Amino acid sequence: MNAHVVAGGRLKRALEASAEEAGCAIDFPAMRDREFNFSIFEGGRHAMTAIVAGDDARAWLEQLDEYALTLPGYALAQLEVGCVEAKDGRLLVELEAITVREA
């Protein structure tokens, strides 16, 4: 399996665990992982749409950055929370991330 796909799966699981710890539920109706490689590192770019529910969903999203999650075997170089739209008591969120495989 490609490293960027593995990193995307680990990122998804880390987000799920973090959301659960904050008392939120998260679902990913769309996720895309692409290679993001340079001569000195192997990585991936990840774009996902998430649906987040819970009383503390907005607070959880506000504290979410590349320092908030740990991905075994990978460094989370960047994590950005993009568009957040409230819909039916849940938040529709666009997330983008860059992961780098640890040496």
Image: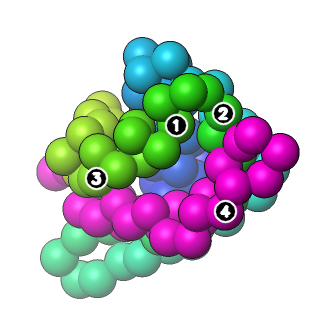
Question: Is 41 left, or right, of 5 in this rendering?
Answer: left
Indicate whether residue 75 is drawn in magenta. Answer: no
Residue carrying label 4: 85
Question: Is 74 left, or right, of 10 in this rendering?
Answer: left
Does 94 appear above or below 64? below
Main secondary-structure element of the magenta-colored stretch? strand
- Give me the C-alpha separation between circle 4 and circle 2: 12 Å
Most foreground residue, 20 or 77: 20
Most foreground residue, 10 or 53: 53
Percent position of residue 74, x then y: 29, 46
Residue carrying label 2: 53
Percent position of residue 43, x then y: 36, 65
- Give me the C-alpha separation between circle 3 and circle 2: 19 Å
Q: What element carries label 3?
A: loop
Reading the chain from its start, which is encountered first: label 4 or label 1? 1
Asked if marks 4 and 2 touch (Cβ < 8 Å), the reply is: no
- Which residues lie in the magenta part? 77-103
Nearer the observer, disc 3 or disc 2?
Answer: 2
Nearer the observer, disc 3 or disc 1?
Answer: 1
Q: Residue 57: which numbered mark, if any? A: 1
